[in-house]
Amino acid sequence: MLKTLKSLNIIDLTVIIFYLFLIGMNLIFCNRVEHWKVLIAIEIGVILFAVVSAVKHHNSNSLIWKHLHLWYVAPLILLTFKQLYYMVHPIHPTDYDQLLIKIDRWLFGVDPTVWIYQFANPVLTELLQIVYNLFYLLPIILGIELVVKKRMLEFEYAAFLVVYGFFLSYLGYFSLPAIGPRFTLHDFYAIEWELPGLLLTNALREFVNIGESIPSGTPNPEIVVQRDVFPSGHTQLTLVVMILSYRFNAKTKYFLLPAGALLIIATVYMRYHYVIDLIAGFIFMLLTFWSGKYLYAWWNKFVGKEILDVT
C-alpha cells in the first residue's frame, strides 16, 4: 500500500481526492441526481486509472504509460466538467444570477456586458471569440514546452496547479450556480446579429454552446445550460497559466500573455460572465497558488520526491 502511495504524484492525489468528493456527493444526493450510478462508476474508473497509470509509469520504462500518466488529466478536466452538468443543478437548483447582477451594479453602476457593447465590431468579436475558444489549449501549450525541454519538475507543478485550480472552481459552481448575462441581461437568440464576427465566430460560438449542452435549436436553453459562471474558471486558470509561463520564463509566454489578457476581456465582451465572476476568478487564482504550494511541498516530502522551489 505504501509503495503504491509513493507512486502517486500530487496530480494523482488531487484527482483521487476530488473524485472521492464527487462519489460522496452522488451518494448523498442520489435521490436528486438521475444518473448517479453511472457517474459513480465513471468516478471509480477514473480513480483506478489514476492509480494504475501512476504505478505503471513508476515501475516500468513504457513510453505509453509514461505519456498516459503525464497527459490523462487533459481530457479528464473535460470529463469532470460534463459530470457536473448532471450534478450541480439537481443538487443546488437555485440560480444566483440576480445576486451577481446586483453586485456588478453596486460595483460599477452599470451592467458591464451592456456597457462594453458600445465597443463592439466584427473584427474585435472575431478575435475575442477565437481567443476565448483557446482556453483549454493554453495550459497544454505551456505543458508541451516544458515536456519537450525536459523540465519535468516544472511540468508537474504546473499541471498540478491547473488541475487543482479547475477543481476549486468546480466547487464554486456547486456553491453559487448561475447561467450568465447572455441569458439574463441579453437576448441569447439575438447574439448572432448583435455581436457578429467574420468567418469563425458563429462556428466557435456554437462549439462553446455544444460544450455547455445547448446546441443550436435547443428550446429554453437557459433552463438546460450548464451552471458554470461563478467563479470565472476562464479567468482563474488563464491567470494561473500566464503567471507560470512568466515565472518559468517559457518561450510560449510571448503568446500566452497577450492571448490570456484578451481571453479575460472576452469573458465579459462575449457575455459569458459578470465582472464579479472575474473578480472571484482572481481570488480563486490567489487561493490556488497559496494553498497549492503547501499541498505540493507536503505530498512530495511525504513520498520522498524532489521538490521544485516555488517560493
Image (tube, rainbow, N blue to C red):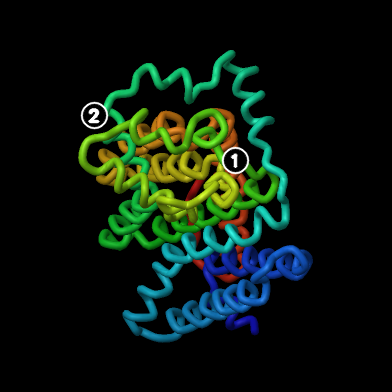
Residue drawn at the location 53% of the way across and 61% of the way down:
82
For disc 1, the neighbor class at 10 Å (few under 14, some 14 to 19, many from 20) is many
Residues 51 and 204: in front is 204
Q: Label 1 vs label 2: CA separation?
A: 28 Å
Residues 279 and 221: in front is 221
Residue drawn at the location 47% of the way across and 37% of the way down:
188
Amino acid carrying mark 1 in the image: Phe
Q: Can the viewer see residue 292? A: no
For disc 2, the neighbor class at 10 Å (few under 14, some 14 to 19, many from 20) is few
Q: Which mark is residue 175?
A: none
Q: Earlier in the sequence, mark 1 or mark 2?
A: 2
Q: Which mark is residue 123?
A: 2
Is 84 situated above or below 9? above
Is 153 situated above or below 311? below
Q: Is residue 237 left or right of residue 86?
A: left
What kind of element bears circle 2? helix
Identify the image quadrant of residue 30: bottom right
Q: Which mark is residue 230?
A: 1
Residue drawn at the location 51% of the way across and 82% of the way down:
52
